[in-house]
Amino acid sequence: MTNQVVIRMAKELKVASKKNKAPIWLRLSEMALKPARTKRVLNLGQIDRFVSDNDIVIVPGKVLGTGNISHKITLCSFSISTTGAKKITQSGGKIIDFAQMIKNNPTGKGVKILG
């Protein structure tokens, strides 16, 4: 059974995709509705390899706090560990939710999907 919060988030992403003509939000809504066993789990060390300063990153899965992040990034993910959140904010980065991500980047330009 899928969590009602996830279903609501997927609907919001689909609406944003149609409204802003941004296929990135439709792709994320499809990823959100996949079974938990298919969702990605990334460590901060893995994320650090693929980003640079001031990147906007979405992880369609869980972010764990293993490793360090040396870049200031804006992160949005389905789930994040407390250690991971603390390390991102200590490096000067931000953690935002999907509603804020859509508001800041309606067309999805400049947003990276990792995972």
Image (cartoon, rainbow, N blue to C red):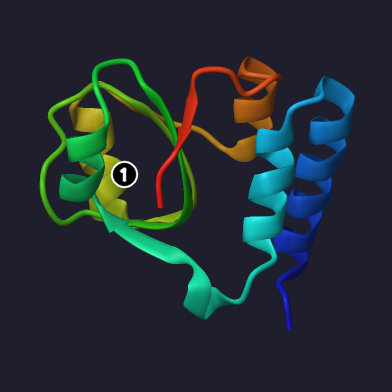
Q: Quadrant of residue 92?
A: top left
| Image position of 11 with respect to 99: above or below | below
Category of crowding for the residue at label 1, using alpha-carbon neighbours closer than 10 angstroms: few (below 14), some (14–19), many (at least 20): some
Horizontal relation, residue 41 to residue 88: left or right: right
| Position in image of residue 114 (x %, y %) | 40, 45
Task: Please state which amino acid type lies under the numbered disc 1.
Answer: Ala
Q: Residue at x 72, y 75 (%)?
A: 2
Spot occupied by residue 26 in the image (x, y as percentages of width and height): 74, 43
Q: Which quarter of the figure is the N terminus placed in?
A: bottom right
Q: Is residue 89 left or right of residue 20?
A: left
Residue depicted at 18% across the width and 38% down the height? 49
Q: Quadrant of residue 16?
A: top right
Relative height, residue 32 to residue 71 (above, below)? below
* In front of the other: 68 or 46: 46
Q: Is residue 94 left or right of residue 10?
A: left
Q: At numbered mark 1, what does the secondary structure look like: helix, strand or loop?
A: helix
Q: Where is 66 relative to 1, above or below?
A: above
Residue designated by label 1: 85
Residue 113 horizontal side relative to residue 10, left or right: left
Outermost residue on the bottom side: it is: 1
The image quadrant of residue 107 is top right
Please state which of residues 68 and 51 is positioned toward the viewer in this rendering. Answer: 51
| Residue lying at 21% horizontally and 54% vertically, measured from the top left | 65
Could you say where residue 7 lies in the image, as x and y percent from the top left?
A: 78, 61
- Report the number of discs: 1
The image position of residue 113, as x and y in percent, is 47, 40
